[in-house]
Amino acid sequence: MSRMADAAKNSGWVLAGRGLERLIRIAVVVVLARTLGVRGFGVYSFAFAFSELFAIFADAGLHAVLVREIAKDRNEAPRILGSALVLKGIMALVSWVAMWVVAVSMIPAGESRASVLVASFLLFVSFRVTSLRALLDAPFEAGLRMAKPVMLGIGSEILSATGIITAAWAGWPIPGLIAVQLILFVPGGVILARLVFREVRPVIRFDPRHWFSLLRMAAPVGAASVFFIIYTRTDLLMLELILGERSVGMYSVAYKLIGSLSIIPLAISTSLLPLLSHAFSEGESDEVRKMYGAAMSLAMALGLPIAVCGIVFPDAIIGLIFGPEFNPAAKAFQVLAGSMLLSFLLHVVATTGVAVGKVGLFAAYAGLLAFLNAALNAALIPPFGILGASWATFVAETVMLLVALVVLRPDVGLPSGGTALRAVGAAAAAAAGLVWIPAPMAFNLFINGVMYATLIFLWRGIAPEGLAMVKLLLEPRFRQSKDSEE
């Protein structure tokens, strides 16, 4: 099987598995939002937003570098992974202590502080952020073999969701809900650790020289990641500071619903990083450009219809999922739906930057982006509330994408403008149908979804390499279906 076929299969696993995880996570968010109310859900969301700021310091770019280096030379996996696990354990412990000190110093005693302190343990056990446990995915990610981690992730998500929903319905306090959620992540992490130690056999040793070598490689990635996580959490933290917990709860339903869709570009970029890293290290510049263009066209083609639905039906989506109490979040959701498309493309661009060694420049502009986003939030939140926070995100991501395209242009060129315009044309035709066709929403979505898929294929709104990857992904499923029918 070719590496592109491996990548297609791997992306299929990531998309299906992580997609199911996100559906489970959305169900949890809906139950918690409806059970806890706007203020309670704001406390829960703030606890994780605060904790995730420190998760990035516990990683410092190690995960991306580990995947890249193992993809280049699989024989070095035991030594690299062993050193990285020890180093990551030390960094997670230091970050955890620092988080407790900051939380106790800055957050008044009460439910919010208790929730943050309990959520701090995600630095060790969560598979949703770059925690100690998440590092165990690296050898599978580098080898395009994400099936086992994905299945364990699904099991962990189901177990955790069952526990936290049961506890919420039983009336447990928010710190207790967070504790249940994190504790039930542990069994999946233990099983994954056993798989890694059996298959990779990492060499665990105290090796400061190798640690410093890894940190030097990871420093630019880590800096960019620090700025990026600050950027993605600034809106929630500033809403808490300026307007309080209710505004965080209102904004979080829109933000988390949009954020759950990041599984789509994640499925693309998970396979893209090892492929690009290998091709770039071999000097295959044409192959790098083709894969980059294919990934960008796929991300745009998949993101456009979702963005259109969010822009056309914001009130119906928020009201149906979260109930009338959260209707004021609809306008923020509408703006965030547009920024979601930019985020899809940014996933691909950032992954490409890591693969081709441009992380230093990315770190610099990510720092400027974090500053820009904070300034925009400070200016827009007081007069416009959560709508101002959503516009700050949209403007900042537009600037980020434009700068990133310019930074990468010397190495990988620009994505095809013609392909992008044809995809936008197909999406515009579908959007017009959604607005003007007088039919029930479900039927309207189906008809215009079919029209969009047809137009984007006929008008070549996806690069040929992107279509080839989709074909490689779907062909085994059709063959299996055909065989079962016979």
Image (tube, rainbow, N blue to C red):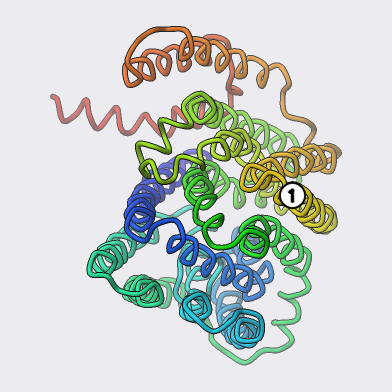
**Snapshot quadrant of residue 35:** bottom left
Where is residue 37 drawn, in percent x and y?
39, 57
Tell me if I can see residue 198 in this picture.
no
Q: Amino acid at mark 1?
A: Gly
Where is residue 342 drawn, in percent x and y?
65, 37
- When the figure is inspected, residue 36 is found, relative to residue 331, above or below; the finding is below
Which residue is outermost to the bottom?
206
- When the figure is inspected, residue 194 is found, relative to residue 367, above or below; the finding is below
- Which quadrant: the C terminus? top left
Numbered disc 1: secondary structure:
helix
**Snapshot quadrant of residue 319:** top left
Where is residue 296 drawn, in percent x and y?
64, 33
* Disc 1: which residue: 353
> How many neighbours does mark 1 have within 10 angstroms: few (below 14), some (14-19), or many (20 or more)?
many
| Left or right side of 376 for 433 | left
Viewer-side residue, 266 vs 309? 309
| Left or right side of 280 for 117 | left
- When the figure is inspected, residue 207 is found, relative to residue 223, above or below; the finding is below
- When the figure is inspected, residue 279 is found, relative to residue 217, above or below; the finding is above
The residue drawn where x is 73% and y is 21% is 417
Where is residue 444 drawn, in percent x and y?
37, 15
The residue drawn where x is 51% and y is 23% is 312
**Snapshot quadrant of residue 174:** bottom left
Which residue is outermost to the left?
486
Q: In this figure, what is the number of numbered marks?
A: 1
Tell me if I can see residue 60 in this picture.
yes
Viewer-side residue, 70 vs 270? 270
